Amino acid sequence: GKSLGLDNDWAYRIIKMVGNYGESFERNLGQGSPLKIDRGINALWFDGGLQYGIPIR
C-alpha cells in the first residue's frame, strides 16, 4: 500500500468496517436485503461464478 500512499492496514480496515464482498452483496442485494437476489455469476469462481479474488500481499 505504500506506493499508493496507504498504510499496511488499509485493506483490513475496509473489510472490518463494511465486510468482504460476499457479506456486502448479501446485505445489500442478496438474501439479507429486500431484493433477495442470488449471487449467480457474482459468486466466487469455485462456486460457479466469475469472481476470482487475486491475493493481495
Image (tube, helix red, strand yellow):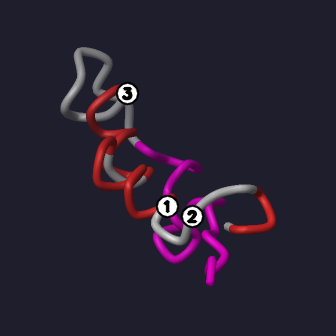
Q: Which residue in the structure is indicated by mark 3?
A: 29
Q: Residue at x 23, y 15 (%)?
A: 34
Q: CA distance from mark 3 to mark 2?
A: 31 Å
Identify which residue, 21 or 15, lies in the foreground.
15
* Amino acid type, residue under disc 1 in the picture: Ala
| Tag 3 near tag 2, CB within 8 Å | no
Q: Main secondary structure of the magenta part?
A: loop
Identify which residue, 14 or 25, lies in the foreground.
14
Quarter of the image where one finds residue 26: top left
- Rendering coords of residue 40 (x, y %): 50, 47
Q: Is residue 48 above or below residue 23?
A: below
Image mark for residue 7? 2
Q: Write down the region rendered in magenta.
A: 39-57
Q: Is residue 39 left or right of residue 2?
A: left
Q: Residue at x 63, y 77 (%)?
A: 56
* Amino acid type, residue under disc 3 in the picture: Leu
Which mark is in front, 2 or 1? 2
Q: Which residue in the structure is indicated by mark 1?
A: 11
